[in-house]
Amino acid sequence: MHPAHYENLTPAQAIAHQHELRRKVDIKPLEKPIRVIGGADISFNKDSDIVYAGIVLFNYPELKVIGTATAISKTKFPYISGLLAFREVPALLDAWLKLPIMPDLMVLDGQGIAHERRLGIATHFGLVTDTPSIGSAKSRLYGRYDEPANIPLATSRMYDNGEVIGTAIRSKRNCNPIYVSPGHHISMEQSVEVIKNSLRGYRIPEPTRQAHLLVNKIRIEDSGNNNLQINLFD
């Protein structure tokens, strides 16, 4: 199913599509070198049909910005936890098609397989684009874990009925952890390694931090509203 048709789905149909996609998820080591990494984020109001998408490209591991792409689109699909990819993927795909070069790996602000049906935004987008992807989320959606030690880079595995579905990482002392899970075409261990290598003194990794700044910039420019919160980097 092409993402252009997502807005016509009912929630039940969207869940059924996630079950179909789940059979195609490939969590295994990425063999090719990572030279270009992309960070992606979305911004929208729950009650609005406008979706702002942004992707920032970096060389890796230096993380120098080498390109960006943005898109503004509309969706009729409702805001439902666990189904946000059906609002977000079409807009992200619009931005993806504008990129000057294709990245070797994408990091998305959201879940990979740390999702009830293993189909978070990073997994969903990785499947649609057939691109290695990692989810790095600011909040837990699914899975149980013990709090990682209060030291930088401490980790704690996230479980669902004994299955490891993600890793909580203490990116900064005295900050809530971030929640990392592989999306597609990459292993759990590599996902954690890439995110650790992408931390630059903020709570969230640089790819999604820069993507967040980008989408809020285009949202402010589009709406003229200067009261948006962009203080997520304590």
Image (cartoon, rainbow, N blue to C red):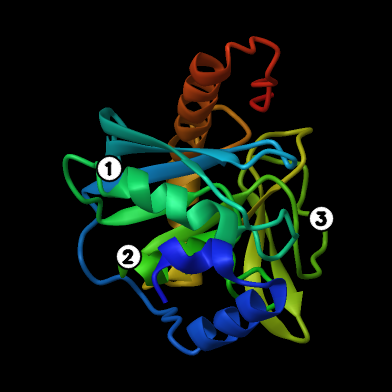
Indicate the position of residue 141 as horizontal and vertical percent values: 75, 61
In the visual, does 87 lie left or right of 59? right
Distance between mark 2 and mark 3 Cα atoms: 34 Å
Name which residue type carries label 2.
Thr
Distance between mark 3 and mark 1 Cα atoms: 29 Å
Q: Earlier in the sequence, mark 1 or mark 2?
A: 1
The residue carrying mark 3 is 147
In the visual, does 97 lie left or right of 121? left
Q: Quadrant where the N terminus lies?
A: bottom left
Q: Secondary structure at mark 1?
A: loop
Q: Quadrant of residue 30?
A: bottom left
Q: Residue furthest left?
A: 101
Q: Earlier in the sequence, mark 3 or mark 1?
A: 1
Q: Quadrant of residue 18?
A: bottom right
Q: Secondary structure at mark 3?
A: loop
Name which residue type carries label 3.
Glu
Indicate the position of residue 163 as horizontal and vertical percent values: 68, 84
The residue carrying mark 2 is 129
Is residue 182 in view? no
Identify which residue, 176 or 115, lies in the foreground.
115
The residue carrying mark 1 is 60
Q: Secondary structure at mark 2?
A: helix
